Amino acid sequence: MGCLPEAWISPPAVRELRELVRHRAKLVRLRSGCTAEVHAVLARCGIQVVNSDLFGVWGTELLDGLDLPAPYAARAASLRRVMDGLDFEIDVFAGLARGRMAHQPGYTAVQKIPGIGPILAAVFVAEIGDISRFASASKLTCWASRPSWNGSPSKAPVWCAGRRSSQSRPSPKAAWSGCCGSGSLTIAAGTSAALRPPGAS
């Protein structure tokens, strides 16, 4: 006995929180894809967008007033309807995640770290789980910097500083390494301290 390394199995509550956070992230990626497609439609029609906020008040007025050829107009309108639906679902799952963490001291504490807001805090709490399983901030950084891969070794993604190749699939841990970059150890130290109960070493 004692020959194999100890594995941590997340409890049901953590797994359920991860479902909410990860699904919201997936919805955001889908919305970003729709945004890019709308820009592509305008580019095909030779329309230059001079304002970065194409889907704000200014952009909405621009899109509403465009006289595009019927196929392009139909595609743009379809994408905007899909985005409206995705916005609704993103808000729903963000609310469900916030409701689960409303009474978790660590969720509030980790937001005191500069650069970490409610969304990123939810990702950290969900993906890290029980912070006490990491003896130090450096061990937390080491865990967060390694991708999870259950497929064929020959098809494993190549990761570097939180970035992935165009053919790789991101690990949930990339939320850490991709956002923190070279300051990951500093962020890890703050997160580790914030998520530990008062008095814990």
Image: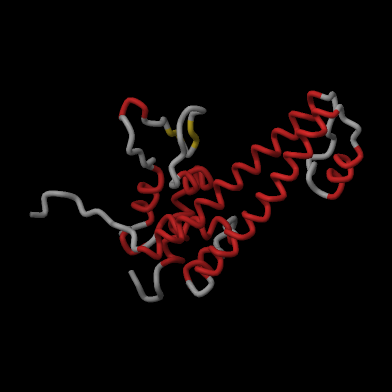
Q: Residue furthest left?
A: 1
Please tell me which residue is depicted at 15% across the width and 49% down the height of the picture. 4
State left or right for residue 63 relative to residue 84. Answer: right
State left or right for residue 83 relative to residue 104. Answer: right
State left or right for residue 6 relative to residue 102. Answer: left
Residue 79, image x, y percentages: 72, 39
Please tell me which residue is depicted at 61% across the width and 47% down the height of the picture. 28
Q: In the rendered view, tell whether residue 75 sits above or below residue 108.
A: above
State left or right for residue 58 relative to residue 130. Answer: right
Residue 89, image x, y percentages: 63, 55
Please tell me which residue is depicted at 50% across the width and 57% down the height of the picture. 20
Residue 186, image x, y percentages: 47, 53
Q: In the rendered view, tell whether residue 177 sits above or below residue 165.
A: below
> What is the quadrant of the N terminus in the image?
bottom left
Please tell me which residue is depicted at 37% across the width and 53% down the height of the picture. 140
Foreground residue among 186 and 32:
32
Q: Based on the displayed image, in which of its 4 quarters is residue 196 positioned?
A: bottom left
Residue 62, image x, y percentages: 88, 40
> What is the quadrant of the C terminus in the image?
bottom left
Foreground residue among 176 and 167:
167
Q: Based on the displayed image, in which of its 4 quarters is residue 60 positioned?
A: top right
